[in-house]
Image: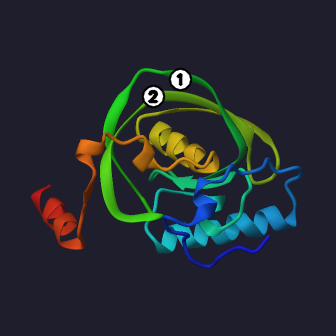
Amino acid sequence: MAIRDEIVTYPDRVLGEQAKAVGKVDKKTKELVDAMVKIMREENGVGLAANQVGVLQRVFVYDDGNGLGVLINAKIISRKGEQTGPEGCLSVPGLQGEVTRANEVVVKGLDENGKEVKIKAEGLLARIFQHEMDHLDGCLFIQRADPDTLHYVSDDDEDEEEADE
């Protein structure tokens, strides 16, 4: 398992491949998680899937502002409601578009210690879970976005938006 020290970007083939389930959460899994957390934080992301660092394992890390989380072999067991909002991706730098997703999801999986967890998420956290699980299935947000809303955002545009708030 060779972990890349930078984020894989589109059109790299690994982004379109299906990740494999983790058989056992072990030292190598924890090393992968640590590397992913470091990269996600360096890039100011809210989520990062293992294939974004070149590893085809069903692992993702996230932080919606309420603390760091890790999900391994996660599955969505229920979806409810609908939300449409802007998404971007560290693997498709600068591109954003409107994506419709479930507003609430219940996810089952394992935490970084291999313990079973069940999480009910709504709003932003639900969006993050769905986005990262799409990555693990080889699907990028650009495949789900309304094509008419896809546009590139520069750092200057983001600075202006922040100034407006």
The image quadrant that residue 96 belongs to is bottom left
From the viewer's side, name the closer residue of 18 and 40.
18
At a point 54% along the width and 29% down the height, the residue shown is 105
- The numbered mark, 1 or 2, whose residue comes first in the sequence reads 1
Q: Mark 2 points at which residue?
A: 102
Decide if residue 67 is in sight here: yes
The image quadrant that residue 151 belongs to is bottom left
Q: Position of residue 112 (x, y in %)?
A: 75, 54
Residue 16 as seen in the image, left or right of residue 64: right
Q: Could you tell me the amino acid type at mark 2?
A: Ala
At a point 52% along the width and 40% down the height, the residue shown is 130
Q: Which mark is residue 79?
A: 1
At a point 65% along the width and 53% down the height, the residue shown is 17
Q: Position of residue 46 (x, y in %)?
A: 47, 56
Q: Where is residue 91 in the image (x, y as percent from the top left)?
A: 48, 64
Q: Could you tell me the amino acid type at mark 1?
A: Arg
At a point 77% along the width and 50% down the height, the residue shown is 20
Return the residue found at the far left: 164
Residue 139 as seen in the image, left or right of residue 141: right
CA–CA distance in space, label 1 to label 2? 6 Å
In what quadrant of the picture does the N terminus appear? bottom right
Q: Mark 1 and 2 residues: CB-CB less than 8 Å, in contact?
A: yes
